[in-house]
Image (cartoon, rainbow, N blue to C red):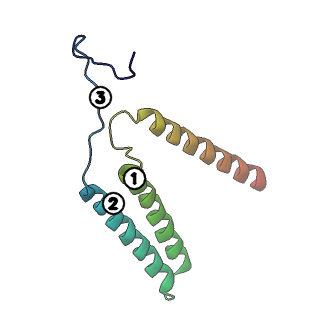
Amino acid sequence: MSSDHNHTASGEETKRHKVEGPKKHIVGFVMSLALTIIAFAAVSAGEINATFTYIILVAMAVVQVFIQMAFWMHMKDRGHMFPIIGIFAGIFVVLTMVVMALYWVWW
């Protein structure tokens, strides 16, 4: 018996991954590059307040994470709810641990 199955008799359709062209990957790359340049420019400009620079870096990092997840990890596609739930659960656990550590240190 061969490993290929013909599903025409049962009416089942094989699910195939929709092939995306390079356009979306190029858009994601350009957005990531722009965020990196903004973060680099914020650090390179010595006249900016250090606190404001940290805020810019964290904001660019957060946006970069979402761009990476959407364009490169394909989290925007259907069928990725379980990994998304796992990522948010991990973020919740990490934030809870950070809050508990800060509370323990400052108590």
Element carrying mark 1: helix
Q: Which residue in the protein does label 1 denote?
A: 72
Residue 83 seen in render: yes
Q: Residue at point 25% right, 11% down? A: 10
Name the residue located 61 percent from the left edge and 41 percent from the top edge: 93
Question: What numbered label is drawn on residue 12?
Answer: none
Mark 2, secondary structure of its residue = helix
Q: Is residue 36 left or right of residue 19?
A: right
Q: Residue furthest front?
A: 1
Residue 48 visible to the viewer: no
In the rendering, at what x and y percent does residue 107 appear? Answer: 77, 51
Q: What is the CA distance from the residue labelled 3 to the residue labelled 1? A: 21 Å
Mark 2 or 3: the one toward you: 3
Q: Residues within 10 Å of mark 3 (few under 14, many from 20)?
A: few
- Residue receiving disc 3: 15
Q: How many marks?
A: 3
Where is residue 2, by image quadrant? top left
- Label 2 neighbourhood size at 10 Å, few (<14), some (14-19), many (20+)? some
Kindly indicate the quadrant of the structure image that contains residue 38. Answer: bottom left
User: Would you place residue 68 above or below residue 45 in this image?
Assistant: above
Q: Earlier in the sequence, mark 2 or mark 1?
A: 2
- Residue type at mark 1? Trp
Q: Please name the residue shown 22% across and 16% down the image.
A: 8
Which residue position is annotated with label 2?
28
At label 3, the amino acid type is: Lys
Up-down: is 49 above or below 95? below
Does residue 104 appear to the left or right of 11 in the view shown?
right
Do labels 2 and 3 touch, CB within 8 Å? no
| Cα distance between the residues tagged 2 and 3 | 26 Å
The quadrant the N terminus occupies is: top left
* Structural distance between the alpha carbons of marks 2 and 1: 8 Å
Position in image of residue 32 (x %, y %) = 38, 65
